[in-house]
Image (cartoon, helix red, strand yellow):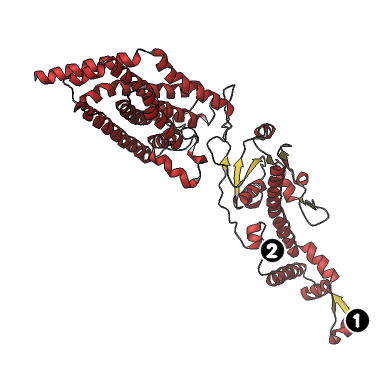
């Protein structure tokens, strides 16, 4: 019992001693907090909104739909333009909320061009016709956008990309306008006015047996219909209607591969689009103010540099152990009734406490200073924090293990750098703390999973997704924490082995 008490008292004294050694240089501790904040601040100002994202190999079509009309199937024709773009292969469709946002994005060179569908678009489409009294929407290059209340806002600095986007818009407008006009014209074949024109202009030869009665060589279709109805006006109208339907059926039979009554490209050509793109609503990810507060890139920068500097605690721990070796304190500790495991516990807990505090303060600064989110907008802040706590702890545990492993190997400050700082920086680079893994070649992204930093960022990014509506997968977060605990166990085991060898008088 006395032995247990003495060991617990010795461990408590060791904790106090280690804590005093670690905090005796407040400037070093302060730099562990301030330096990552400076890095995050500078990069947050310099980097664009696309930081950390692989460039999309598809054309992003940004659209503002101001069309409020209703026509075909109870929907606006602006809806059918969006539907056509959605079904177009290699297209990413982005919906912007208003004209002001579109003009701002183009003016700031964030979008090469934006298609604007005006509020009068549906009415204009309804008036498009092959007849002389309708709108002719076609010109040599496609659809005259102004005639159907559409336009492209273009960035003069991105002419090539804007030109591609305009051609995509032109093709979609053609696929919307032309089938509607064909279907509308085909419907006219059964209209009484068309049948009147047809009946007056179709001349049929009179059979010899009827020439004596009619006293004509030819007779118009209109006269034949009048004779067939025997003066019954209602019957004559019905015969004219049936004649129109007969014309429609004849043409439909002749062109059976097409549905000439269809008013969309899919129904006209009896085909479906190959694309499966979904509409995405524009979210302002650029932030605001001098430091772009609230920008989506902080959701990546803050955890990246929190993880990187967590593992740089190896400098602080290594310098303390080297000083103890130089001053003889390390030899006195070997003579004390301490096992290697107790010594690791005595040295590790204060380091773990500092690391947890560092991670918590950096995340707090990320929220207060940089306006980052801790989770989906519809999730309570307490729940967001509760999900982050295990990740902060597991990252600190792995960082503490690596720091102790390096400290038990190093004999000089140079060796601290070689055994601790350099490996920590290399692992951080491979894990995605410096260069996001999305920018790695796909063949080498697996390397991140071989580092504790890679698993730490996996867990953090699952919880700190830039998409405010994304629900985190707790299973993914759990795997990240479990992997970090595994790395921590390996690091602590290596540190224990080094101490055990030293305890038996062998250099370690």
Looking at the rendered image, the disc whose residue lies closer to the viewer, 2 or 1, is 2
Would residue 367 be seen by someone viewing this image from the given angle?
no
CA gap between label 2 and label 1 equals 41 Å
**At which x and y percent is residue 113?**
69, 40
SS type, badge 1? loop
Between 447 and 268, the one lying in front of the other is 447
Question: What residue is at 52 percent from the left and 40 percent from the top?
Answer: 439
**At which x and y percent is residue 276?**
55, 52
Q: Is residue 29 above or below residue 269?
A: above
The residue labelled by disc 1 is 215
SS type, badge 2? loop
Query: Would you say 129 lies left or right of 434 here?
Result: right
The residue labelled by disc 2 is 260
Question: What residue is at 43 percent from the left and 38 percent from the top?
Answer: 471
Between 467 and 436, the one lying in front of the other is 436
**At which x and y percent is residue 19?**
30, 16
Q: Residues within 10 Å of mark 1 (few under 14, many from 20)?
A: few
Between 71 and 484, the one lying in front of the other is 484
> In the current view of this chain or complex, which residue is farthest to the bottom?
209
Between 390 and 246, the one lying in front of the other is 390
């Amino acid at each position: 019992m006395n032995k247990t008490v003495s060991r617990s008292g010795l461990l408590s004294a060791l904790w106090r001693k280690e804590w005093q050694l670690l905090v005796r240089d407040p400037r070093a501790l302060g730099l562990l907090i301030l330096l990552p904040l400076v890095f995050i601040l500078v990069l947050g100002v310099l980097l664009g909104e696309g930081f950390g994202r692989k460039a999309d190999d598809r054309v992003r079509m940004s659209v503002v739909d101001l069309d409020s009309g209703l026509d075909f199937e109870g929907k606006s024709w602006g809806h059918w333009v969006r539907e056509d773009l959605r079904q177009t292969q290699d297209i990413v469709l982005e919906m912007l909320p208003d004209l002001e946002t579109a003009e701002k994005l183009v003016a700031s060179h964030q979008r090469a061009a934006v298609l604007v569908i005006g509020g009068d678009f549906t009415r204009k489409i309804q008036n498009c016709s092959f007849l002389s009294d309708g709108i002719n929407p076609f010109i040599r290059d496609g659809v005259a956008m102004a005639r159907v209340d559409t336009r492209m806002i273009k960035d003069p600095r991105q002419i090539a990309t804007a030109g591609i986007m305009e051609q995509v818009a032109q093709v979609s407008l053609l696929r919307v306008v032309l089938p509607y006009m064909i279907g509308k014209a085909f419907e006219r074949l059964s209209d009484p006015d068309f049948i009147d024109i047809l009946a007056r202009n179709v001349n049929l030869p009179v059979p010899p047996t009827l020439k004596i009665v009619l006293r004509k060589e030819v007779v118009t279709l209109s006269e034949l219909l009048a004779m067939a109805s025997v003066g019954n006006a209602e019957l004559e109208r019905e015969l004219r209607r049936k004649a129109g339907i007969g014309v429609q059926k004849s043409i439909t039979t002749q062109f059976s591969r097409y549905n000439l009554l269809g008013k969309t490209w899919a129904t006209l050509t009896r085909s479906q689009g190959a694309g499966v793109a979904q509409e995405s609503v524009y979210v302002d990810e650029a932030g605001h103010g001098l430091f772009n507060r609230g920008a989506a890139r902080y959701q990546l920068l803050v955890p990246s540099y929190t993880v990187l500097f967590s593992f740089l605690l190896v400098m602080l721990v290594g310098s303390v152990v080297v000083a103890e070796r130089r001053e003889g304190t390390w030899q006195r500790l070997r003579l004390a009734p301490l096992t290697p495991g107790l010594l690791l516990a005595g040295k590790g807990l204060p380091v773990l406490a500092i690391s947890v505090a560092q991670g918590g303060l950096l995340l707090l600064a990320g929220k207060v200073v940089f306006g980052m989110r801790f989770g989906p907008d519809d999730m309570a802040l307490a729940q967001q924090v509760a999900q982050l706590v295990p990740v902060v702890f597991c990252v600190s545990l792995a960082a503490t293990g690596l720091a102790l492993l390096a400290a038990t190997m190093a004999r000089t400050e140079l060796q601290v750098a070689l055994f601790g700082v350099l490996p920590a920086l290399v692992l951080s680079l491979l894990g995605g703390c410096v260069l996001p893994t999305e920018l790695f070649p796909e063949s080498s992204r697996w390397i991140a999973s071989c580092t504790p930093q890679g698993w730490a960022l996996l867990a953090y990014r699952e919880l700190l997704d830039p998409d405010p509506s994304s629900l985190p997968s707790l299973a993914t977060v759990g795997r990240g924490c479990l992997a970090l605990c595994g790395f921590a166990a390996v690091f602590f085991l290596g540190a224990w082995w080094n101490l055990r060898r030293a305890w038996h008088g062998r250099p370690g």
